[in-house]
Amino acid sequence: MPVPSPQPLTFADASARVDAYISQFEEGYFPPLLLMARLSEEAGEVARVIAHEHGKTPKPGEDAGDLELELADLLFVMICMANRGGISLERGFARMMDKVETRDAGRWTRKDRTVNGGSV
């Protein structure tokens, strides 16, 4: 049975949901170096799935993986890092997009925005 599509989620919503989950436990958020290790581990799992999707044959008995779930695992750890440090992912993302939209505005070849001789 397919999983239903979730309602739209903001970074603030995701941050609050992760914090509500983590706050249930005495241990709380992992320390920064352990979070960094977890982030690296999850990035490796994303790499494994992509390798399986693009030519590397999984080992016998090894699951090819689920890229959507692995990216979500990576996002969970990033949200944990941000929450632990009191960092706003919404503000950080807006700052990053402003940086790439200005600094890199002319860096890449723009797609041709005409179709059949007219503008799109």
Image (spheres, rainbow, N blue to C red):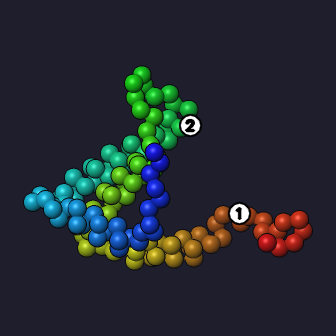
Q: Position of residue 75 (x, y in %)?
A: 37, 58
Q: Is residue 18 left or right of residue 60?
A: left
Residue 87 x %, y %? 30, 73
Mark before the other along the chain sequence, 1 or 2: 2
**Residue at 51 percent of width and 72 percent of height:** 97
| Residue kind at label 1, given as amino acid type | Thr
- Point out the image quarter for the N terminus: top left
Residue at screen point 22% across, 62% down: 21
Inspect the image, locate mark 2, and give the three-letter code of the amino acid beneath it.
His
Q: Residue furthest right?
A: 117
Q: Residue at x 41, y 71 (%)?
A: 10
Q: Give the quarter of the image for residue 120.
A: bottom right
Residue 58, visible in the rendered structure: yes
The answer to whether 37 is drawn above or below residue 96 in the figure is above
Distance, label 1 to label 2, CA atoms, is 25 Å
Q: Residue furthest front?
A: 1
Residue 24 percent coordinates (x, y) = 15, 62
Q: In the figure, residue 33 lies in which quadrant?
A: bottom left
Which residue is tagged 2? 54
**Secondary structure found at label 2:** loop
Residue at position x 40%, y 48% from top?
Answer: 70
Position of 16 with respect to 8 (left or right) is: left
Residue position for label 1: 109
Q: Is residue 77 left or right of residue 59?
A: left
* Rendered view: 117 above or below 41: below
Q: Secondary structure at mark 1?
A: loop
Residue 87, compared with residue 50, is above or below; it is: below
Using a 10 Å C-alpha cutoff, classify the residue at mark 1 as few (fewer than 14 neighbours), some (14 to 19) or many (20 or more): few
